Image (cartoon, helix red, strand yellow):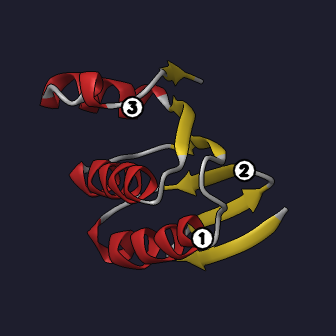
Amino acid sequence: MSCLLEEGGVRLDAEGARLAVSGDVDFEVAAALAASGSDWLARQPSATRLVLDLSGVERVSSAALSVLLEWTRRAEAAGLVIENVTLSAPLVRLTRIAGLDSLLPEAAVA
């Protein structure tokens, strides 16, 4: 497993084709998190089947959703396939409230 970012209690790890986030994602760390994940996505070969794992995100804000949607756009633009998205229970509630759950491919609750 490779640590791509550790900042403000948030950690971003990559292992194989899996990108995993843990911690409390807020606006303080969102830009760095989005950039680190986007850089990793840009290095993946086209048609790679990805797993985005946000099951370790405990307390959330709309910043976490913004990061997730940014990664989804970047992956699609790069020809990557998001096979699965795993969300923590707080993120599932937030995506449903915001009406964004239908925009996420195969979102599952951890």
Above or below residue 52? Residue 70 is below
Residue 74 % position (x, y): 39, 60
The three-letter amino acid code for the residue at tag 1 is: Trp
- The residue nearer to you, when weighing 7 against 75, is 75
Above or below residue 69? Residue 109 is above
Q: Residue at x 38, y 48 (%)?
A: 72
Q: Residue at x 58, y 54 (%)?
A: 21
Q: Which residue is mark 1?
A: 40
Q: Which residue is mark 3?
A: 90
Q: Residues within 10 Å of mark 2 (few under 14, many from 20)?
A: some
The three-letter amino acid code for the residue at tag 3 is: Pro
Q: Which residue is mark 2?
A: 17
Q: Residues within 10 Å of mark 1 (few under 14, many from 20)?
A: some
- The residue nearer to you, when weighing 63 against 38, is 38
Which residue reaches farthest left? 98
Relative side of 35 to 43, left or right = left
Residue 2 sits in quarter: bottom right
Residue 9 % position (x, y): 55, 69
Residue 46 sits in quarter: bottom right
